[in-house]
Image: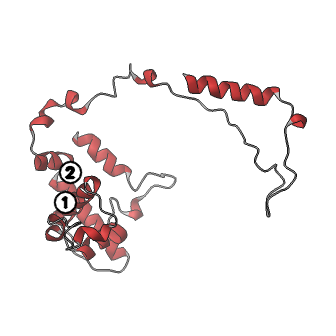
Amino acid sequence: MYAVNWLSQLQYMEEATPESSQPTTSKKAKGASSKEVGRPTWKKCTVIENNSLQGDDSLQCLTDKDPELLTLERIQLFHTMFPETYLDHLASMTCLYAAQKGQIVSYNKHDIAQFFGLLLISGYHNVPREDMYWSTAEDVTVSIVPTAMPRQKFRDIKKIYFHIMDNIKLKDGDKLGKISPLYDELNDNL
């Protein structure tokens, strides 16, 4: 509520102050445009208050919607979100994209599951650089990572080949077309 009042006061002050009474700077930065340097520009915006979402029934806790998720083991929960058939699909899309790039690779559902597992581990066990997950140094070692997947294979999947959808089937103008199938799958499974 305070932000709304503060913003409206700033907008009122800007509207009430004539342009000629605004301070100007005598020196302009090198390469600066003809606009005044240092003068803020204000834009009107809509501020959403926290209590405006309380009556929305579509936003509810996932465990309230599906309480059986609490009883599942971690791997069962993972396979609830990403069934093996969908992991097969992701592996085939990744191999297809690599083939379109002129590379022959062979990834399967286990490789994609391990890839997602390593991404999940990197979300809660932070090291300064990604390469350090495969380090043998005592202070940064994560013993499960090198046994799950070699570093180069992880890099290749992450930076070069991983794809959710065939680029040829993308619709024109669909800015989220490459990632929306993943969100659709998660919404369907949960």
Q: Which of 136 and 54 is in front in this view?
A: 136
Q: Is residue 45 above or below residue 133?
A: above
Residue hosting label 1? 113
- Mark 1 or 2 closer to N-term? 2
Is 148 placed left or right of 35 in the picture? Answer: left
- Dividing the picture into quadrants, the one containing residue 72 is top left
**Nearer mark to the viewer, of 1 and 2:** 1
Q: Which residue lies furthest to the right in this view?
A: 20
Residue at image location 62% in from the left, 22% down from the top: 5
Q: How crowded is mark 2: few (under 14 residues within 10 Å), some or many (20 or more)?
A: some
Residue 58 visible at all:
yes
Q: Residues within 10 Å of mark 1 (few under 14, many from 20)?
A: many
Q: Position of residue 107 (x, y in %)?
A: 21, 70
Residue 151 picture quarter: bottom left
Q: Which residue is drawn at 29% across and 27% down?
A: 60
Residue type, label 2: Phe
Q: Position of residue 146 (x, y in %)?
A: 17, 71
Q: Please identify the quarter of the rendering in which residue 2 is found.
A: top right
| Disc number placed over residue 82 in the picture, else none | 2
Quadrant showing the N terminus = top right
**Residue 56 left/right relative to 14:** left
Question: Is 120 drawn above or below residue 100 in the view shown?
Answer: above
Dot 2: what SS?
A: loop
Q: Nearer the viewer, residue 188 or 21?
A: 21
